[in-house]
Image (cartoon, rainbow, N blue to C red):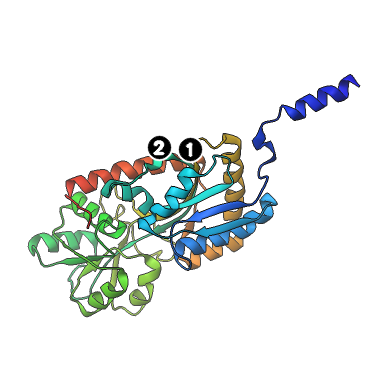
Amino acid sequence: MQRLAMITLCVLALPAHAAYPEKPVRMIVPLAAGGGMDTTARSIATPLTERLAQTVVVDNRPGGGGNVGVDIMREAPADGHTLFMGSATFVIHPLLYKARYVPTRDFTAITQVTRQPYVLIVHPSVPAKTVKELVAYTKANPNKINYASSGQGSLIHLASELFKVRTGADMTHIPYKGMGAAYTDMLSGRIQASFPSIISVLPHLRTGKLRALAVSSAQRAATLPDIPSVQEAGVRDFDVSNWYGLFAPVGTPRPVIDRIHREVAVILKTADMQKRMAADGSDAVGSTPAEFAAHVKAESARWAEVIKKSNIRAD
């Protein structure tokens, strides 16, 4: 009888999160359905449902530059039943706008899910086949190279400005509302350079209508194994990729954070998930909470430096 009483007391003494998850888990995606972030979230939600034995529902909450989804997360209980899929833009946004959040203060990093490298491309009319040749050409021909981005303050914009800071290249920014219109001008030669995503530009590289000089990540990309990285081409401290990652409200118990990370990391190692990510031009990551938190902190510091040095202002 005494033994039974002790077991009962031990069970009652277990923390509330010991049974996590106790109900369906909601994954907030601050963008509309159908995009890359949404696809990534849904590809994880299905196997995560099986591993957690609770339904994981993707909840698209677009609007306000991502602030609608962010506000929902900030008000959610810190119990692991509401998660948030963020991206590099999630870190950049409060550096340019009067945002109501600070990623490192208001959210707990769980794991970086993906990494999507960019690639430095030029129009064939540009007489440069290496990064070194491009930099030399821009310096010898000031104001002659225009580069496209998907908008003021976008990651493509910041990556290009970081390239200018690191190399001294002379290039002029031409912002577009998305890369669709930018490609029209790049293919015609009206725009001579850019840092688009690999998956979006790959068809034009294969036809030779555009030329790849280097990938933006520190390592070569699996989809472009013959193209060196910008760092490999001699540019120091240049490692840029878009990314998606999972966050929880600040204060979420560490055992819950560790459980979610553990399950997602296992999912990302499966052959099926690796194949899905590769088809989308992404690399599966699955970093630890500590590694991801350090990455977010480093990204925030780096882009703050670029924004200041390049005098970038939000639209």
Looking at the image, which residue is at 50% across and 40% down?
289
Q: Quadrant of the N terminus?
A: top right
| Residue at mark 1 to residue at mark 2: CA–CA distance | 7 Å
In-front residue for pair 17/298: 17
Asked if residue 236 can be seen in this view, the reply is no
The mark total stands at: 2
Residue type at numbered disc 2: Arg
Give left or right: position of 95 versus 79: left
Give left or right: position of 129 versus 296: left
Asked if residue 154 can be seen in this view, the reply is yes
Q: Are marks 1 and 2 in contact (CB under 8 Å)?
A: yes
Residue type at numbered disc 1: Val
Give left or right: position of 217 versus 182: right
Quarter of the rendering containing residue 300:
top left
Looking at the image, which residue is at 65% across and 55% down?
55
Give left or right: position of 306 versus 272: left
Quarter of the rendering containing residue 4:
top right
Secondary structure category for the residue under label 1: loop
Determine whether 3 is above or below 240 in the image. above
Q: Which residue is mark 1?
A: 250
Coordinates of residue 200 in the picture (x, y in percent): 38, 70
Crowding at label 2, few (<14), some or many (≥20) Cα neighbours within 10 Å? Answer: few
Q: What mark, if any, has residue 301 been given in the picture?
A: none
In-front residue for pair 186/131: 186
Q: Which residue is mark 2?
A: 105
